[in-house]
Image (cartoon, helix red, strand yellow):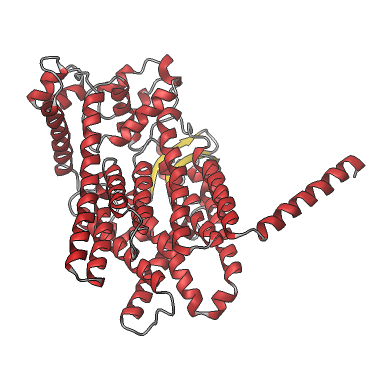
């Protein structure tokens, strides 16, 4: 080796050794910051790269592109979901003006777009990037949640990889979908909730108000997260059960009241902003405009047509019209369809969805709604492990062993998971559900895992002794599984052989294009 290169290699080795030593011997506070920064870097790399691929709309983007275009034009409209997520897409378009040079006005004329008519050169970055950025924020929030649960930086880092390397999150959150916003606000509410559970926060009324606000923001993205307000109920019921006094009852009522107030105020504010920021009347000649106008009350239409001034009555009517539109859409929802998933089977990744595939003549690229099997398997371990530990504790066959706080939090998160799961099993009888509706439940199962691990490590000496090796092994498995399925996540071209490899040991993808049977091939000759 030339002397210059040898000198550079030695210096690099020395520098790497220096930082490795600093990291290994760092105090806990420094380690928390360093590992948090590493989570940020990994999340940015996984969620923010190649956002414009594929350069075609897929799944619900065919609805949301049209909604984003109407927001761009400040046109009043209604949708199947609350307006907050579309506002973020509009913000992305306001910042990234790449598509301004294209004629995109016709996209607003329909509620659902034929993806084949998207203008050539249309850049999806503007409406997808806000969702991806929220995913990065969600990864940091998840790290902070696990850090609060474990109080150990390395454990928090390892278990945060469940979020960062979750293929289904990456597929869905790098698209112009609503789930990233919903889950990020939900994670924020859980982080705030943790500061209220089992202890009094420094500013209790403010803390509960912030919890309600974050639940409201999540709800105003997708309404199925309404169930998460039960976390507040879990805290207050536990507090009342622990201390049954009149003062504590009044205190709990006040805290529940400000949480409800924060929630309702957020809902009202978002609806009001939607009305005020979109003062242009829909085009009655377009399909979308005709449909929206039919759902609008007269006071709202009069304001849009400059026949009356903006006042509280207009805002109320516009907001209530939006609510009625969503309710009507839910009422008419279909109960089954080929990609529909049974909520009771969600922990087992029931009904993977192929969003899109593209064939170049030799290889095929997929956007596949498939999760990281290692993560989902660990999620099942967490659910079962939590149930076993809780039953053992409540039947007095298992002592707390100085881990009362861990057990209490595990019971609360497990209860929230069961409430979420049962609520969605009921929703599955009312409308078709998809596996990505499980994202909040999946995140809750990920949160249970570090608590189950901590409790089990205290109970089993072998696990405690080899804790570091176990955590490192889990990290490698999570990352390796993510990399194995990454081509299905990032729309990367694969040969058929490479595609079929992903179907071992469980079928994950229908490899396209489908091979024709000999009889069918003969008919085409």
Kindly indicate the quadrant of the structure image that contains residue 399: bottom left
State left or right for residue 277 relative to residue 510: left
- Placement of the C terminus among the 4 image quadrants: top left
Question: Dividing the picture into quarters, in which one does residue 76 lie?
Answer: top left
| Rendered-image quadrant of the N terminus | top right
Q: Name which residue lies at 22% across and 25% down.
A: 276
The image shows residue 73, relative to residue 212, as above or below, that is: above
- Horizontal placement of 120 versus 469: left or right? left
Residue farthest to the right, as pictured: 3
- Where residue 389 sits: x, y (%)? 38, 75
- Percent across and percent down for residue 470 are 57, 68
Residue 289 in the image: above or below residue 132? above
Q: Foreground residue, 205 or 219? A: 205
Q: Residue at x 26, y 44 (%)?
A: 216
Residue at the location (56% across, 44% down)?
41
The front one of 226 and 341 is: 226
Farthest residue to the bottom: give it: 397
Residue shown at 52% from the left, 52% from the top: 482
Image position, residue 468 (x, y; %) = 60, 67
**480 is higher (above) or lower (below) than 42:** below
Image quadrant where residue 321 sits: top left
| Observer able to see residue 522 | no
Report whether residue 234 is seen. Answer: yes
Q: How many numbered marks have been drawn onto this rendered protein structure?
A: 0
Residue lying at the far front of the rendered structure: 247
């Amino acid at each position: 080796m030339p002397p210059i290169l040898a000198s550079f290699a030695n210096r690099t080795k020395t520098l790497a050794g220096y930082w490795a030593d600093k990291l290994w011997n760092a105090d806990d506070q420094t380690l928390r910051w360093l590992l948090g920064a590493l989570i940020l870097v990994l999340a940015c790399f996984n969620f923010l790269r190649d956002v414009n691929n594929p350069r075609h709309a897929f799944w619900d983007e065919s609805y949301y592109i049209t909604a984003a275009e109407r927001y761009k034009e400040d046109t009043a409209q209604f949708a199947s979901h609350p307006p907050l997520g579309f506002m973020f897409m509009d913000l992305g378009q306001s910042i990234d003006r790449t598509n301004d040079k294209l004629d995109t006005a016709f996209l607003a004329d329909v509620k659902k777009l034929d993806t084949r008519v998207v203008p050539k050169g249309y850049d999806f970055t503007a409406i997808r990037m806000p969702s991806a950025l929220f995913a990065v924020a969600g990864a940091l929030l998840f790290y902070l949640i696990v850090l609060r649960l474990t109080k150990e930086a390395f454990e928090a880092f390892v278990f945060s990889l469940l979020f960062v390397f979750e293929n289904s999150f990456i597929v869905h959150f790098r698209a112009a979908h609503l789930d990233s916003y919903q889950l990020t606000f939900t994670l924020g509410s859980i982080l705030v909730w943790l500061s209220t559970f089992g202890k009094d926060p420094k500013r209790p009324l403010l803390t509960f108000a912030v919890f309600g606000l974050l639940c409201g923001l999540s709800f105003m993205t997708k309404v199925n997260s309404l169930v998460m307000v039960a976390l507040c109920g879990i805290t207050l019921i536990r507090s009342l059960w622990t201390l049954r006094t009149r003062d504590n009852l009044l205190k709990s009522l006040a805290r529940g009241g400000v949480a409800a107030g924060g929630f309702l105020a957020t809902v009202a504010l978002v609806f009001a902003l939607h009305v005020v920021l979109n003062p242009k009347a829909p085009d009655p000649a377009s399909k979308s405009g005709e449909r929206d106008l039919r759902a609008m009350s007269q006071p709202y239409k009069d304001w849009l047509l400059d026949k009356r001034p903006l006042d509280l009555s207009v805002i109320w009517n516009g907001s209530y019209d939006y609510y009625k539109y969503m309710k009507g859409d839910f009422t008419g929802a279909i109960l089954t369809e080929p990609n529909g998933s049974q909520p009771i089977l969600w922990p087992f990744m029931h009904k993977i969805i192929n969003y899109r595939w593209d064939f170049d003549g030799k290889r095929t690229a997929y956007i596949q709604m498939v999760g990281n099997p290692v993560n989902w398997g660990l999620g099942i371990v967490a659910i079962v492990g939590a149930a076993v530990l809780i039953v053992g504790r409540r039947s007095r066959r298992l002592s707390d062993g100085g881990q009362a706080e861990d057990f209490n939090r595990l019971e609360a998160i497990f209860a929230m998971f069961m409430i979420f799961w049962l609520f969605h099993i009921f929703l599955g009888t009312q409308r078709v559900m998809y596996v990505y509706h499980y994202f909040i439940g999946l995140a809750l199962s990920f949160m249970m895992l570090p608590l189950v691990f901590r409790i089990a490590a205290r109970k089993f000496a072998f696990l405690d002794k080899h804790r570091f090796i176990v955590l490192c092994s889990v990290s490698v498995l999570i990352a390796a599984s993510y990399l194995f399925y990454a081509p299905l996540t990032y729309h990367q071209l694969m040969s058929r052989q490479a595609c079929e490899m992903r179907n071992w040991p469980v079928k994950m993808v229908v490899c396209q294009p489908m091979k024709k049977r000999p009889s069918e091939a003969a008919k085409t000759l």
